Image (cartoon, grey):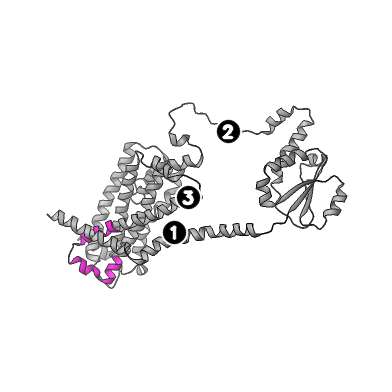
Amino acid sequence: MKATTTIRNTSTIARWEVRRLIWNKTFIISLILTPILIGVFAGLPALLAAVEDVTEERETFTLYVLDELGIYESLYAKMERAYTQYATKYNIILQRFAGSREELEARIGGNYSAGYMVFNNETIRSKEINIVLGGTYGPDLDFIKDFVQPLLLHHQLAQYNIDPDEIDRILAGYSIRITPMIVDEIPEDIVKPGIIGMIAKWIPGIFAGLILFLAFISGMTTMQSAISDKKDKIVEILLSSVSADELMQGKIIGNFIAGLIQGSVYLIYILIALSIFGGIPLLPIILDHLLVPVLPEMLFFTLTGYLLFSALFIGLGATMEDVSTAGNFQSLIMMLPMLPVVFVFPIVKNPDGLVALVASYIPFVTPLAMLIRMTLTDMSALEIILPAIVLVVSTLIVSKIAGRIFRVGILMYGKNASPLEIWKWIRQ
């Protein structure tokens, strides 16, 4: 009977928290406008640049060629194939000049929309492609090297009577091919090429990581909710109907549900934006690769991590009159959930290394460390079970301590609790 009453009261508080957080104009407006504003500010610079490119009348730049080596036709053909890319970006026209250099310099001298380059034996000897501008400045012409260099090398090797096909093979360069000595069955997500395969591999970890991020945000909201109720003295009314433990549990559950709703809406915005502007069919990829065997373990660490963070935050909120007046002790405790950030890079670099192993057993780091490790490497059952036990035990201990602090601190007004007072509450 008592358990039924506790569940009913906890669910009532949770529903009240959800309604209070979600069913108000400020939340609904921010839920709709925030992603739109982010998209506008993110896309506005690119849009303005595109408008500038469309409206700007780009002056054509004529690049004359004095060719004594006979490579102009090949150069023109190569650039013509890439004409759309370079002509659109630079608006450059390549043109052969049949006269002398002196005549050409007399023609383009002082002309900012023209220049020339010379291909002769001196070019081969000096290994330098010299482009002369008619004025003091001109467009970016560095890309010319990618077209001219292979042709000059081909011309130089041809002087040694090497077969043209052999020259092409010499200039083709080298690629790296990795062949495993042991061939096992290759997972499908590794076989998939490019970005799609990479996205598919990371989907479960990204999904669980988003939930963990929402859990952290919801934990902060839980703390703010406790402080707000304490400041407005609503907590006295609530505690006349429910116990302190039921109030704390209801706030934790309610804020998590509200955070999931908010995060789900933002996630839908992101998926739509990536599908439209990124050209990646994300929904089929997610549906195919989300439900993997390791997903339940990831969700376990995520949800348990949320309970740990929320218990910490709500207990901390009961000790403060306001976040802005938090003492050094409270500020130090508030930084604990930031601790996992320190371990992210070493874990990603070596998910099986010593740092990753140690981080898996540090309670406030365990959720994120295990998510990264399970995404990047294969882990044995024991490697998953032991950190899970550490996390569960730590969560139970922190929840017990937070409950004792919450019962006393939530009814204390006018000041922040000192570390000595908090220690007395814990020992009660």
Quickly name the residue at label 3: 274
Mark 2 lies on a secondary structure that is: loop
CA distance separating discs 3 and 1: 13 Å
- Mark 3: which amino acid? Leu
**Label 1 CA crowd tier, 10 Å (few <14, some 14–19, many 20+):** some
Quickly name the residue at label 2: 176
The residue sitting at 47% across, 59% down in the picture is: 38
Mark 3 lies on a secondary structure that is: helix
Q: Give the foreground label among 2 and 1.
A: 1
Picture coordinates of residue 92, whole percent (x, y):
72, 50
Is 234 part of what is drawn in magenta?
A: yes
Marking on residue 35 = 1
Q: Which numbered disc, 2 or 1, marks the residue that appears first in the sequence?
A: 1
Q: Which numbered disc, 3 or 1, marks the residue that appears first in the sequence?
A: 1
What quarter of the picture does the C terminus occupy?
bottom left
Q: Do we see residue 330 in this rendering?
A: yes
Q: In this picture, is 76 found above or below 321?
A: above
Dominant SS of magenta comes to helix
Q: Which numbered disc, 3 or 2, marks the residue that appears first in the sequence?
A: 2
Mark 1 lies on a secondary structure that is: helix
CA distance separating discs 2 and 1: 43 Å
Question: Looking at the rendering, which quadrant does residue 157 occupy?
Answer: top right
Q: In this picture, is 222 found above or below 98?
A: below
Picture coordinates of residue 347, whole percent (x, y):
43, 45
